[in-house]
Image (cartoon, rainbow, N blue to C red):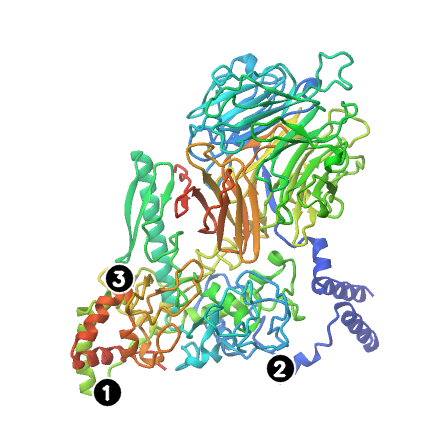
Amino acid sequence: MTTKRLIAIAAMAALITGTGSAASDKVEWAEITAELGKVKQAPSGHLSFQRLKKLLDIGEALFVAKFTTEDGAGRPAATQAIDPTKVRHQPTEPFARLSGPDSLACSSCHNDPVPGGAGGFVTNVFVSEGFTNANFDTSDPQFSNERGTNHLFGAGLVELLAREMSADLAATRSSALRLARQKARPVEVTLESKGVSFGVLTALPDGLVDLSGIDGVDTDLVIRPFSQKGVMTSLRQFTVNAMNHHHGMQATERFGSRWTGENDFDEDGHSNEMTPGDISALVAWQATLPAPGIQTPASDAWKQAARSGADLFNDWTCNSCHRQTLPLDSLVFSDPGPYDAAGTLDDKQVEVTAEYDLKMLEWAQKLPTDEQGRVLVPLFGDLKRHKITDRQIAALGNELLSQRFVGRDVFMTTELWGIGSTAPYGHRNNFTTLNSVILAHGGAARDSRDLYEAAPEEKRLALIAYLRTLVINK
Amino acid sequence: MTRFFKLIAGCVALATSLSGKAAIAQNFPFDVPNMLEQAAAAGLNHTYDGPWEFFVGGGVASFDCNGDRMPDLFLAGGSNPAQLFINRSALAGELKFKKAPIGLSERDSSRVLGAYPVDIDSDSHMDLVVLRLGENIILKGEGNCQFTKANRTFAFDGGNAWSTGFAATWEKAATYPTLAIGNYVDRSAPGSPWGTCEANVLHRPVADGKLDYSQPYKLKPGYCSLSMLFTDWNKSGNPSLRITNDRQYYRGGQEQLWRIPAAGTPRLFSRSQGWKPLRIWGMGIAEADLNQDGYPEYALTSMGDTMLQTLEPDAEGERPTYRDAAYEKQMTAHRPYTGTDLKPSTGWHTQFADFNNDTRLDLYIAKGNVEAMPDFAAYDPDNLLMGDDDQKFHEQGDKAGINLDRRGRGAAIADLNADGMLDMVVVNRKGPASLFRNQGAKTDWGHRPMGNWLAIELNNGKQNISGVGAKITIKTGNVTQSRMVQIGGGHASGQAGFIHVGLGVAERAKIRVQWPNGDWSHEYRVFANNFVQIPRGKPNALYWYPQPSSP
């Protein structure tokens, strides 16, 4: 074939497709993210350490990549909404601090103390549904909730715990229904998993379930462990949401033609911006981030104070919500997972899920276990939502919008692992000290908070000493 | 040179994949349900047959007769006996039905053209109005799929006509429903069948709180109706009766819309009131508010074009002036979409439903030659017109697998195995009934579920328990959908049970209900992929879980 003919064909292709030459993509200094699309197909089956490592390398590269408009960053025709939604007015600027896109990279915010970590006040995000008033230009809390950036260390363990707890609650519901049908009378059962109570439900003989007594969990009894509000089911869902919201990088599994009728829903000239494989790589990297640990203080004084603080943590019943550990039966992470709904890939949408055993990772091998061989995940949380304000103590009730059916003053218990590395505190990142955020606990945490407040300074400092040992290892 | 053409083809393919919406619309990128016909394997063996009188009819009623909330099926047989099949399907698995006795005499179970379920006496057991050639019958549900003939108990005169249509409504705050019976040709009139249409009949309780239908009212003139539906066409809160009529036999007739004032005398809407005469071979009615303006659209099946009646914009609910929008919506379905027979189609049952759970309503049409009409298609496959995001419809019947060589008549679309995807039963004339299991979208490796969904049941309280006449609105993001709880329409086929709604990629939804008396509920918040019950006056929705299959 002659060069002339090749040029003619290339020109024809360009004419037909309306795109320019891709030659600029080939050079090593091209302003693109080379790792995008590198995972040709979403991984499936058991992943060996070597296969997992390859996936993680790509996942990390995507997490720290600064996506460009050449990659498909930006969403001129779409809002930040989780359900694909067209804008009413196209924005004039590529970035918008409030409605987004508001960053090029995941690590622009998740970076303290290392990529995957939390972020300072400057990295706060603005949570609004994005269906109407998408392009608001005010930080007035009636239009959005301002939230700090959470760290992602140990996130794989958190998702695994949530899955097991969701399965427990569903099994309790099933057995209650079975009994109600057998006995032909209502059956009330306590919902409990891993020692955490989620209220009661009443199963009726005809298969109906009265959920008015449940506590801290959604009515479908699925534990949604992610976000400060506890409204995201999985790392996969969180990733798909965040890639659109913050970067304008739209995942095919939600914004593709199967659901929207378009390959380029955000109309930025790039189709299928993030493949299922890209999302899988990002999920794998986040899911395998090490669990934060407990640092042994350098000084004896701190060591002693921390020991005392650990006791006080229990004495003051901080551990009623911030449970030091929750037991986990299996470290095998499957992706896509079992609890997502259409729009995020789940295990029913693929032939075979990818499975990787976190036990392959050195940090996971060091996690403590109980006498039953279960891994004790040291998250300092209960994966349950609680009311955190009351009439007197209301500083954490500063949001005006409920989010996804969860009331304004109700939040997921913050997992305290890593808290020594991730100041500032509170869901808006507006508490500079641990002392101040402890004193801001009202509602369900009021008794513990009052005990803390009433204690002598030495004891209060001891608790702080303990909490400051909960760090993310660099 | 071959490589050159391959390259060109590759370029064109690339262009097609990238050139946006127009190209995509042609390829229909959304999920298409794979419908597996499994009537024989499921134990649903049934044929609708008979002479001329049974060229029409052939309905099916889908409803729960034993309190397990799984749809059971009653199928009209024409000259064959009607049959009742109890749902024994495995949860999210293969469909399975078991024939059960109806408790009717041989006489009463024959010559049946159709059936509609409605809980007339609000005892929580669904009753069944059986349309026959001869006396119509009300079967009172007694629970556990037992029925007793209740014509005498309800003082209901079943008449002796050729009945083909039915609709029910609770007028205002009435305790018991008003029943409308649609009749076809009066065979005993001189000159029959041409121009001898039987009047339709309105059965109202003689007084509120009294279950006594002893004073039927004849809706004259009748124009050989084949389907009827109580519909709140103008958002007045006072449904009118829409009747579609078969021009094959009437003289000077047309489509009809009756104003039914509460406790007042029914009156036909006239030309001076904005009603535009329309003459079609009306066979079936389906209602949906496709553009969410509060004024429903109506799909009308006929011979040749299917119609889509939409209110003229300047009518504004004041006048029932409709125009046809079927062409612009690409849903005329006027001739077979596969095969070589290009003669006009014959449409019967029609129903809007979201088969792929993508939030966009689809339209099913049962098709089939009347008997041996030479000017109409002999091979006339049923339609599955699937909605896109531009409110247009795309034929996917062949891809879905419903393009069988059978003469379709009545049908019911319901989730028969509680897997969140709509299945379908179709009664065919002179052929086996079809039972389609919706397997989800086909892939290289099997089938995968489609969009998210909700199944909604209303609990309206002690009377009109299932809330017939209520409007349900479902909001996800910026998308609002609505469903009416109705008894009527289709072709001789009615259904009761969960109202199915596709949610697309939304994982939660807000539901509000306008109850039959016009009161609006507060907002109920529910998570996707669940069966939910909205109990009137209660703060929270209840969830329902089907009984797991026995191991």
Q: Earlier in the sequence, mark 3 or mark 2?
A: 2
Instruction: Determine the secondary structure under disc 3.
Output: loop
Residue A95 image-quadrant placement: bottom right
Up the image or down, B488 lies above or below A333; here it is above
Q: Residue at 59% of width from left, 27% of height from top?
A: B264
Foreground residue, B445 or A282?
Answer: A282
Residue A332, visible in the rendered structure: yes
Query: Which label belongs to residue A373?
Result: 3
On the image, the x and y values in percent for residue A259 come to 60, 57
| Label 1 packing within 10 angstroms: few (<14), some (14-19), many (20+) | few
Position of the N terminus of chain B by quadrant: bottom right
The residue that mark 2 highlights is A31
Position of the C terminus of chain B by quadrant: top left
**CA–CA distance in space, label 3 to label 2:** 49 Å
Instruction: Determine the secondary structure under disc 1.
Output: loop
Chain ID for label 3?
Answer: A
Left of A67 or right of it: where is B145? left
Q: Nearer the viewer, mark 3 or mark 1?
A: 1
- Which amino acid does the dot numbered 3 rest on? Gly
- Which amino acid does the dot numbered 2 rest on? Glu
Query: Which label belongs to residue A298?
Result: 1
Foreground residue, A153 or A384?
Answer: A384
**CA–CA distance in space, label 3 to label 1:** 32 Å
Query: Which label belongs to residue A401?
Result: none
Residue B239 image-quadrant placement: top right
On the image, the x and y values in percent for residue A473 come to 34, 80
Up the image or down, A32 lies above or below A75; here it is below
Foreground residue, B158 or A359?
Answer: B158
Foreground residue, A116 or B508?
Answer: B508
Q: Are marks 3 and 2 on the same chain?
A: yes
